[in-house]
Image (cartoon, rainbow, N blue to C red):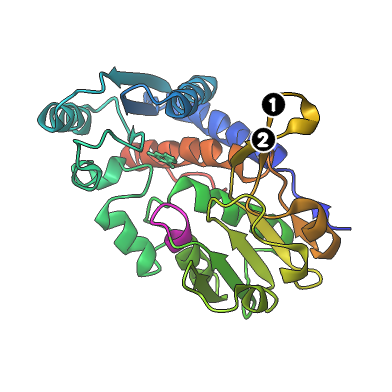
Amino acid sequence: MAEIIDGKQVAESVVATVADATRGLAGKGVQPGLAVVIVGEDPASQVYVASKSKKAKECGFHSVQHTLPADTSQPDLVALIETLNADPAIHGILVQLPLPDHIDAGAIIQTIDPEKDVDGFTFVNVGRLGTGEVDTAFVPCTPAGSMLLIERVRGSDLSGLNAVVVGRSNIVGKPMANLLLAANCTVTVAHSRTKDLPALCRTADIVVAAVGRPEMVKGDWIKEGATVIDVGINRIPAPEKGEGKTRLVGDVAFAEAAEKAGAITPVPGGVGPMTIALLMANTLVSACRVAGVTPPRF
Ligand code: GUN
């Protein structure tokens, strides 16, 4: 039976390190500042944004949230981001995705100052990560958090291990592949057109599932002893809990995969808590750079 990787516990230790370093920065007259921008009323986004703002306060940050109406124009959103770019009290800017259809999300992201781009979505940060400049890049929070969990199990040098990343999104799959490559893994990125995905996954010492399909990765796809990181968060009907009830599952069929894996993340309680923790870490790192202080290592 696999080790169940406790993402909640690792996330708490990251947040404790951030809070500690924030107290240290106060002595230099710097308080990390995080601005979170949400446009419209998507209920899931509202929940995420509220928890990001709450965690920022827990860390001792200056935390601001801008909630804009769904019909906000693109120029008005750009104007807000430019104000935040110029505000010395703000070290991190996060524009919650998705944005309403009339706004070009790609263009909006590129207006964020790369030195405040704590999501790691601007071309500058994507380029830094892609060229292996992992120490200067802001790395997107979900893959950065997933990588910390992998390192807890496998150590920081993953030389020669085969890693399969299932999913090629800009937010998770591609940056995850680059992080694993920077750690000396042999990386394959699989996607909807990949042939014989089960056979490919069986070659993997590390499987990262980030496709958004409930329980797609089966137990017999997993090599004995592999590390399995499940990024998926899918809500599915749970009639066994009663009429109209639902439950959360990942992209991995957890019970059967846990029979084969050496270590596996649960859903919930695996990667999920890490995402917010790494947003706090990125914001702290940004503030440390401004203050000329060496940030802690996570
Ligand atoms: N929406 C879902 N995940 C994310 C994320 O990591 N960052 C932002 N900005 N929006 C998201």
Find numbered disc 1 in the image and state the secondary structure of the residue it sits on: loop
**Stretch of the chain drawn in magenta:** 169-175
Residue drawn at x 35%, y 19% as measured from the top left: 64
- Amino acid at pointer 1: Lys
Q: Is residue 177 left or right of residue 62?
A: right
Residue 69, percent from left and from top: 25, 18
Does residue 144 sit above or below 203 in this rendering?
above
User: What x and y, as percent, mark residue 218?
Assistant: 72, 62
Residue in the foreground of this view, choosing between 15 and 188: 188
In the image: residue 90, left or right of residue 10: left
Residue sitting at the far right: 1
- Taking 65 as reference, is 116 above or below it? below
Is the residue indicated by label 1 positioned so its CB lies within 8 Å of ligand 1?
Answer: no
Q: Is residue 129 left or right of residue 157?
A: left
Q: Is mark 2 within 8 Å of ligand 1?
A: no
Residue topped by disc 1: 245
Residue nearer the viewer, 105 or 102: 102
Task: Tell me if label 1 and label 2 are in contact, CB under 8 Å.
Answer: yes
Q: CA distance from mark 1 to mark 2?
A: 6 Å
Element type where label 2 sits in the image:
strand
User: Where does ligand 1 appear, by image quarter?
Assistant: top left
Q: The N terminus is located in which quarter? A: bottom right
Q: Residue furthest left?
A: 75
Q: Quadrant of residue 40?
A: top left
* Residue 85 placement: quadrant: top left
Q: Amino acid at mark 2?
A: Pro
Measured as percent of width and height from the top left, residue 251 is found at: 63, 53
Residue drawn where x is 44% and y is 60% of the image: 175
Residue indicated by mark 2: 237
| Label disc, if present, on residue 50 of the rendered structure | none
